[in-house]
Image (tube, rainbow, N blue to C red):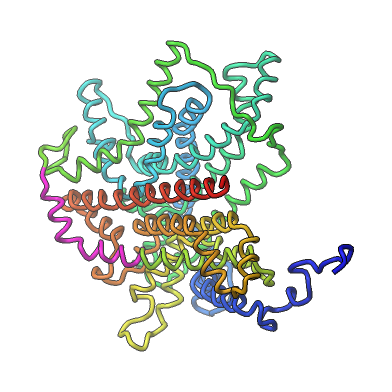
Amino acid sequence: MPQDTPRPAVGTGLADRLPAFLFPRLSGAALAGLLIAIFLLGFLIFPVLQVVYVAFIDSRSGGLTLQNFADFFATSLFRESFVNSFYVSAMSVVVATIIALPLAYITTRFNFGGSALIQSLGFIPLIMPPFVGAVAMSLIFGRNGTVNLMLREHLGFTIPFMEGLNGVILVQSIHYFPFILINLSASLRNIDRSMEEAAQNLGSSGLRLFRKIVFPLAMPGYIAGAVLVFIKVFDDLGTPLLLNVNNMLAPQAYLRITSVGISDPMGYVISVILVAFSILSLWASFLVMRGKDYATVQKGGGGLAKRDLSGREKVIAYGAVLFILALVLSPHLGLLLLSFSTIWSFAPLPDGYTWANYVRMWEGSQDYILNTLLYAGIAALGDVILGTAIAYIVMRTGLIGRKGLDYMATAALAVPGVVLGIGYLRTFQGVDVPFLDKPLAQWWVIIAIALMIRRLPYALRACMAALQQVSVALEEAAESLGATKSRTIRRVVVPLMTGGILAGFVTSFATAAVELSATIMLVSSEADSPLAYGIYLFMQTPSGRGAGAALGIVAVIIVGLGTFLSQIIIERDKKLKTSGAEH
């Protein structure tokens, strides 16, 4: 072919624009995409639409109506729950910011010994599900907890840390503040150093420099973390339930469906409001950031100019950091003490220590643990299979509608677990399975599917990141040597994505193992209960809290090991790819 003859562009011909099933070259990808779309429509989109539909249906006439929403806002309990949920979410963002901001600023702005260790310890709260540490924090910060008993004895007053909504705010803030810490630290490291130097040359320094220059430039990272905290807190079910705070939206949705019945419209109205606020929060963050320029002048921004601390500043900085770390790690310490305690009531520390809680936990929790390994294993395996397939279809094919698969899978982030659980009950309660003597909604497989849907976005992002690092040239080379498309994917693409796939599997498994919001709606018998539900049952009575804490320690170990293994896999994969590129 002469050099000046143009080659046809890849993916721009008519064949790439028409439905793939008309062309054998794309039939495999089209079939996979179709099956994935059907799965997501059946187990994510349709159940959520069912919830939305029922919220607008008149239970008497069967017609569309807004009366259900009018009834919601006309009921004082629901209005109070709405305001409380918004208040708790907003205050959790404020308290989480107060916790995260000093850690992020001190470790990125100053030459501070142990910065890496402090950042690592700051991430630990994410390892413990918030509902697991709620009871332990009540024993430390409650009305008759360790801190208030000491304050009453030595200073003559107490502080209502855990009273009502305060307890939910404190627990949620301590658990979710790492989202702000992670994103804000990354933004502070990427700030263009020349911006700070220019402000200093013009006479700005100290708090004014931070308020006018540094923090505004770090706003993208802060907003990203703050929105995550707001959404997570707004949607959380387990923490308010364990703290016996029922006048919030998520607990009200759960209580209406479980106590009043599956046909009660208020549970669906609350679910719609939960989904709407999740979407509105994401949209609001977009509006805040729109039209503003945070770009750096130099590559990587250079980071803030680090400086040494004076002796007095070191004392203040270390004191602040140690106080914050003691606060955020207190749930883990409390849970560990509770798991070994004989009796811990009206005393700063347990009266005695024993292994009996672990023995009782093991004797009464083997089914919980085995069920969790099964459900989370199925969910994680399904997530990486779906994630790999969607990533390949989106990034390597010209299928029409391929972006829709990505949007549908990612949409699970905006759907609270309690809403998904209610949607499954409404959709599958009347579906009979031929080989079962109960509806589909009461089959344990539905729990595994719910966990799969809830964790799919995490696995998908990991798989997409892994596929981005696989050169298309390697696939083209394999095909030029006679390999079919399917063989190329099996023998070339998937092996090169192994690190990302394994990281996605471990992340999905570890987080699915402690999911409560969705599973609490779908557990039909104790024999089918997963670990998170078992912890919830144990924590309902004071006599069972020791064994519940022991089971909570098992949950923390599972999530901690999963997080650790995920990081090892990611780092090892990076090293292998770096060494491969060098050679």
Describe residue 318's horizontal placement relative to residue 356 as left or right. Answer: right
Of residues 225 and 262, the one drawn nearer to the viewer in this rendering? 225
Of residues 553 and 430, the one drawn nearer to the viewer in this rendering? 553
Of residues 109 and 2, the one drawn nearer to the viewer in this rendering? 2
Q: Position of residue 469 (x, y in %)?
A: 58, 54
| 394 in the magenta segment | no
Q: Quadrant of the N terminus?
A: bottom right
Q: Which residue extends farthest top?
A: 311
Describe residue 103's horizontal placement relative to residue 241 as left or right. Answer: right
Q: Position of residue 514 (x, y in %)?
A: 34, 56
Q: Position of residue 144 (x, y in %)?
A: 22, 36
Residue 422 placement: quadrant: bottom left
Residue 403 placement: quadrant: bottom right
Q: Position of residue 536 (x, y in %)?
A: 28, 56
| 366 in the magenta segment | yes
Query: Eyeballing the image, is 206 above or below 435?
Result: above
Residue at the image point whose x is 37% and y is 41% from the top: 124
Stretch of the chain drawn in magenta: 354-376
Query: Eyeballing the image, is 4 above or below 340?
Result: below
- Number of numbered callouts drawn: 0
Residue 55 can be seen in this image:
no
Query: Eyeballing the image, is 10 above or below 88?
Result: below
Describe residue 325's horizontal placement relative to residue 142 as left or right. Answer: right
Residue 455 can be seen in this image:
yes
Residue at the image point whose x is 50% and y is 68% from the top: 386
Residue at the image point whose x is 66% and y is 78% from the top: 25
Q: Tell me which secondary structure the magenta stretch mostly adopts.
A: helix
